[in-house]
Image: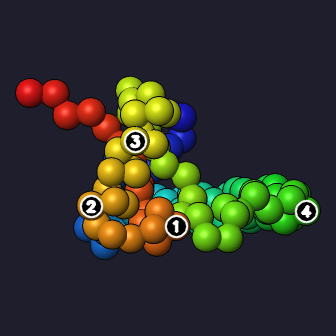
Amino acid sequence: MFLVNQAMVNVSIGTAAIIVVLGMGVVFLGLILLMLVTQIVGKIMTSRTAKSEKAPAAQMAAAPAPARPAPGSAGQVKLYDVPDRTAAMLMAIVANRTGKPLNELRFISIREIKD
């Protein structure tokens, strides 16, 4: 440490400028290396997550497909606090009033509206 202090006593402006430029160069080189390391680690992590996401997708492909609704039906109806019997009566009333058979109507959900 003593030798460095003694060497820096009489420094010309040109030498000081070179020291400053070299110091800034070392700092920027360190920052660039740090940026490269973080990008490499990020690419490694994304490739690992992509591989782990592909594995469940292959397992899901082997699973049986969910059951489809019977031909002529419109699928599931979501009932919100409505008994099955009430929902069936409402669907029958709508079919009667519109003059269409039930298999041509599609009910998405049935919910009681309270005033």
Residue at 67% over, 61% down? 69
Comes first in the chain, label 4 or label 3:
4
Horizontally, residue 8 falls left or right of residue 73, namely: left
Q: Quadrant of residue 64?
A: bottom right
Q: Above or below — where is 47 with respect to 7?
A: below
Q: Nearer the viewer, residue 73 or 48?
A: 73
Where residue 99 sits: x, y (%)? 33, 69
Q: Quadrant of residue 79?
A: top left
Q: Which numbered circle lies on residue 16?
A: none
Q: Amino acid at mark 2?
A: Arg
Q: Amino acid at mark 4?
A: Ala
Residue at 44% over, 28% down? 83
Comes first in the chain, label 3 or label 1:
3
The quarter of the rendered structure image containing the C terminus is: top left
Q: Which residue, given by chain and number where applicable, does mark 3 sit on?
A: 89
Residue depth check, mark 4 versus mark 2: number of the one nearer the observer: 2
- Cα–Cα span, label 1 and label 2: 15 Å
- Cα–Cα span, label 4 and label 2: 45 Å
SS class, disc 2 = helix
The residue most toward the left is: 115
Residue at 57% over, 59% down? 75
Q: Which residue, given by chain and number where applicable, does mark 2 sit on?
A: 97
Q: Amino acid at mark 3?
A: Met
Residue 80 appears in the picture as rendered: yes
Q: Quadrant of residue 55?
A: bottom right
Q: Which residue, given by chain and number where applicable, does mark 1 sit on?
A: 103
Q: Amino acid at mark 1?
A: Asn
Q: Residues within 10 Å of mark 4 (few under 14, many from 20)?
A: few
Residue 51 appears in the picture as rendered: no
Q: Residues within 10 Å of mark 1 (few under 14, many from 20)?
A: few
Where residue 95 sits: x, y (%)? 37, 60
